[in-house]
Amino acid sequence: MAYLDHAATTPMLDVALEAYVATAREVGNASALHGAGRQARRRVEESRERVAAALGARPAEVIFTGGGTESDNLAVKGIFWARRSADRRRTRVVSSAVEHHAVLDAVDWLAAQEGAEVSWLPVDALGRVTPQRLRAELATAADQVAVITTMWASNEVGTVQPVAELAAVAAEHGVPLHTDAIQAVGQVPVDFAASGVSALTVTGHKLGGPAGVGALVLARDVAVTPLLHGGGQERDVRSGTLDTAGIVAFAVALETAVRHQQEYAARVAALRDDLVARVRQAVPEAVLNGDPSDRLPGNAHFSFPGCAGDALLLLLDAQGIACSTGSACSAGVAQPSHVLLAMGADSARAGSSLRFTLGHTSTPEEVDALIAALPEAVDRARRAGSLRASR
Amino acid sequence: MPDGAEKVVGVRVLAAMSGGVDSAVAAARAAEAGHDVTGVHLALARNPKTYRTGARGCCTLEDSRDARRAADMLGIPFYVWDMAERFQADVVDDFVAEYAAGRTPNPCLRCNEKIKFAAVLDRAVALGFDAVVTGHHARLGADGLLRRSVDLAKDQSYVLGVLTREQLGRSMFPLGDSTKTQVRAEATRRGLAVADKPDSHDICFIADGDTRGFLAQRLGAAPGDVVDGATGEVVGRHTGAYAYTVGQRRGLHLDRPAPDGRPRYVLSITPKTNTVTVGPAEALAVSQVQAESPVWIGGPRPADPVECEVQLRAHGAVVPATVAVTGDGLRAELHQPVRGVAAGQAIVAYRPDPAGDIVLGSATIAG
């Protein structure tokens, strides 16, 4: 099998898996007062310190959550609620048109349920949010903005955003900026303090840890209203019994990924560059989407004119090659990517796209397998045409 | 192209999986027969939430999940294909336009003709599949002939009768030799969770089953007269002639009862004058049917009139008839009169056969 979908999820690192199993064998609720509880608590706090150190944050700034979607929701809704409570005029949300649905839909929910006024920052053809656009957006009524949320790097086209510059613009106006860094951590250098952001989302299963555990890194001066109420864990911000084994494995994975980030990025980017060059050679019409230089090392995202992405996926899947068309609706229908549409692509180009993402287990043989299967798949998919009503 | 004889073993087939028990067992049988099966669920609704919920339709989220789960159990790849645009254009819009023109369409038949065995089949073939497998209750043997299912109560040869020989040549109906009871028992034996799921019925894209309301929403109110067929007298008013079907008795809202006090039925719909004509049951009886755009799948186009049996609507009565080709259509002389023959429905001609009645051909009833 050629697994070219590491941005969806990547295999757990052996060290993380071993840490998980070892910790899961131990008993103890980290909130309990006896010895077993203290032992569990110690593991959690050690993990918090590891995560903080790897991300350039303070341990007190790390809030463990049930993963990326929860962290995004907590940041977007929680900061909105807290800042609006402090000042009723703060009802604006500024976000970008290329966010992951965990942010996009949380913002939409605030608009629909809480009366938030939303400004979606447009992106250029490479998928970049520019500091100029944010500055223009904040030129008027910045005091009414409750929260700004823009991602660190695109899960779809791989474009890396100028997060530090965006955070600097936000700071000029005293507005907290949250960034979804799920795809960035372990792939590119990420330093919470140096970036100047107020909140940062990270999750385990994109960097070799388990799914269902992640963190929101939240600056100490930023108030947040909880989503979950209960036992008061995590500074009262996130109630729920701590998943000690998951947290330990997550911290080990994150620490390992960050420690090896440079050599990882060099190796994977070289493999990715080879993939891109050979895809172009095999299918000269293929269009690479996203920023050609400022992009995640493992990401290659193409449009194949005349093909439906879901047809290509089916054909490659039949050859044992796993890749992605982007997001699907709850019924399983592949949706035209809002990211590509925001980048100015028409629906045909958006519907003809396919994402290949490499990771820590990727090999040249997997790229070979893709290149061997791709020309025939493209040929067949082109004959099958699109699913649209036009005949 | 594989003919019946070639598609016995080891071809790549696409199983259309609705989420119901029939298509799940059909896919299972195809896999067990040694075919390389890929499951596909057709998403037909633009917004799945507006379509029938629960187990009744063919396009809800629950159905999509049920289809996926059945595919998991069978260990076959599974995908969802977005056919919403095609379905809207070829089935839903066509349904509304046909009613507006005073005809009575059969959307399931249209879906087979335009979606399952056209858009889906074409795409499947282009992607390298040899055939499409469905859970229809009909027999399609190595001789290429389409026959009624052994389960006459569940037989769906009527809604497949519109398919061409080319379409049938790339189709597989693995359930034709089984009764519905046997299919359910097999689903249970195979551990398929859909084994006891209720049958789908009614029209999947009309969520509440209110066809008249659905049409009124799309076509608007168009009040007109209800006229007695014998006297020409206006006996009532209607809010849209499109909402009526020939043979309909209920919901006529007549101001005046018939002089003889007997019930009256819709005899015809005239969109031009927006008139609904009513009359007594016997005035409904038809002994000759003219039909258009025939397809002949049981053999070559007959040169001489054929003695056969005809069916004039889904689950309708079957009557002996003489069918003759007329220009680019056909004419059927019914040996016994039939009531409630509606333009827009299909006439399907069968040759009685001990091994299952054989579909000779079909055409659209004119009017």
Image: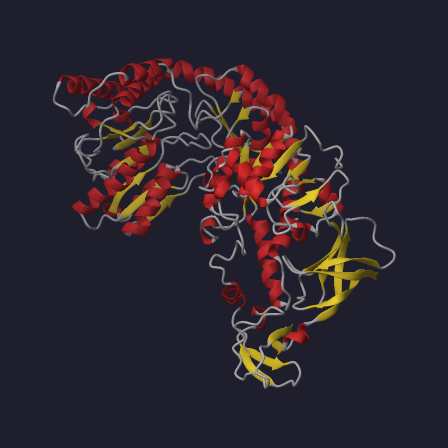
- Residue A86 spot, x, y in % from top left: 16, 45
- Which image quadrant is residue A132 in? top left
Position of the N terminus of chain A, as image quadrant, is top right
Can you give x and y, in whole percent of width and height, for residue A306 in the image? 62, 38
Q: Which residue appears farthest toward the front when viewing the image? A: B354
Q: Quadrant of residue B268?
A: bottom right
> In the rendering, at what x and y percent does residue B41 appear?
54, 41
- Residue at 53% across, 50% down: B200
**Residue that extends furthest to the left in the rendered view of this protein:** A33
Measured as percent of width and height from the top left, residue B44 is found at 54, 48
Query: As drawn, is B344 to the left or to the right of A233?
Result: right
Number of marks? 0
Of B41 and B285, nearer the camera is B285
Q: Does residue A249 lie above or below B126 as drawn?
A: above
Tell me the quarter of the picture where residue A216 sits. top left
Does the rendering let one see residue A274? Answer: yes
